[in-house]
Image (cartoon, grey):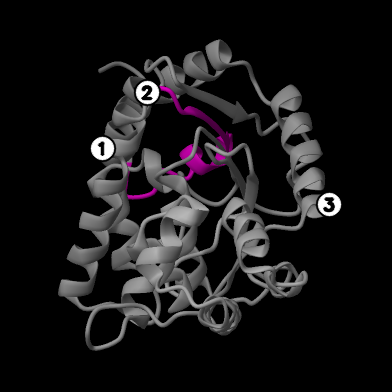
């Protein structure tokens, strides 16, 4: 995953620039709140969120959850205007900004599905593997940028062990491991790390075998997550862009594809056996 390119687009204060659509929603929400005569402190409990969350949404720094929008419409009597603006939030491209929002959603997710056909997902990477990826990125990164990105990536991995009630599903192409990024030692260490992670009861790993000539993921990598409010989001990324997906119709398509991928990939047991085979003798 290329999410941590966000570091290179940070402002001098270290905070990423909000997206235009999120700032537009925040401004609209703020106008309706003020029209209704509420301060952020008075308003927050009415929609079931903290004042700080309301402030972040109005500043365009936090993605507005759908339940927040629905409650805001009711409390502020916004005539459907907020829902109308919300439809356009998340449609702009901009990897750094959108991954920051995805990471916030990821921290609260109760289900997270990931398909990757380029590299090992960030939540499963080792420090050595990540370092190899960042060291070869173009344009070249500074040493301090590399260290910051590695630190951020390793910190995210605590989610697997700490969020034991969250179901994590990973489907990764076999050739990602066959490439042996970083060399044999780095790859073997990576496989050991992933085999250990896959032992967690909330983590499921499947490999897409190389002899599967066609499968449902040929359009590229994708992620799906479910929030505690049972709302689903999707995320897809390309070379220098990323897209947070909120449209139910598109999310339905991604669900259909991911379900098919699960049936086309090796079982978790066979995936483990294949990884052990690639790992060889310890």
Instruction: Read off the residue under disc 3.
Output: 249
Residue at image location 45% in from the left, 64% down from the top: 43
Which residues are the magenta region? 164-183
In which quadrant of the rendered view does residue 3 lie? bottom left
Judging from the image, what secondary structure is the residue with disc 2 in?
Answer: loop
Q: Position of residue 77 (x, y in %)?
A: 69, 68
> In which quadrant will I find the C terminus?
top left
Q: Is 115 situated above or below 70?
A: above
Q: Mark number for residue 113?
A: none
Q: Mark number for residue 164?
A: 2
Q: Position of residue 74 (x, y in %)?
A: 67, 59
In which quadrant of the rendered view does residue 173 lie? top right
Given residues 62 and 3, the one toward you in this image is 62
Ranked by sequence position, the earlier of labels 2 and 1 is 2
30 left or right, relative to 238: left
**Is residue 66 on the magenta stretch?**
no
Q: Mark number for residue 185?
A: 1
**Is residue 167 on the magenta stretch?**
yes
């Amino acid at each position: 995953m290329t999410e941590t390119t966000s570091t290179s687009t940070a402002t001098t204060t270290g905070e990423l620039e909000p997206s235009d659509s999120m700032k537009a929603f925040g401004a609209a929400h703020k106008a309706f709140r003020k029209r209704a005569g509420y301060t952020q402190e008075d308003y927050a409990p009415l929609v079931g969120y903290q004042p700080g969350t309301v402030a972040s949404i109005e500043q365009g720094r936090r993605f507005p959850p759908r339940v927040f929008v629905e409650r805001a419409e009711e409390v502020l009597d916004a005539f459907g205007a907020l829902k109308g603006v919300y439809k356009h939030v998340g449609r702009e491209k901009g990897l750094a900004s959108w991954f920051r929002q995805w990471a916030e959603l990821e921290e609260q997710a109760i289900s997270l599905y990931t398909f990757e056909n380029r590299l090992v997902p960030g939540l499963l990477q080792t420090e050595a593997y990540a370092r190899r990826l960042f060291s070869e990125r173009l344009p070249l990164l500074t040493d301090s940028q590399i260290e910051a990105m590695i630190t951020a990536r390793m910190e995210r991995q605590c989610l697997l062990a700490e969020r034991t009630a969250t179901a994590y599903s990973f489907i990764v192409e076999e050739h990602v491991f066959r490439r042996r990024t970083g060399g044999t030692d780095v790859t073997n260490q990576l496989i050991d790390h992933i085999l250990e992670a896959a032992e967690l009861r909330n983590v499921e790993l499947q490999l897409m075998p190389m002899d599967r000539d066609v499968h449902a993921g040929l359009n590229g990598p994708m992620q799906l997550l479910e929030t505690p409010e049972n709302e689903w989001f999707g995320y897809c990324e390309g070379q220098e862009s990323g897209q947070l997906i909120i449209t139910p119709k598109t999310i339905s398509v991604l669900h259909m594809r991911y379900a098919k991928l699960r049936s086309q990939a090796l079982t978790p047991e066979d995936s483990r056996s294949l990884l052990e085979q690639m790992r060889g003798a310890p």
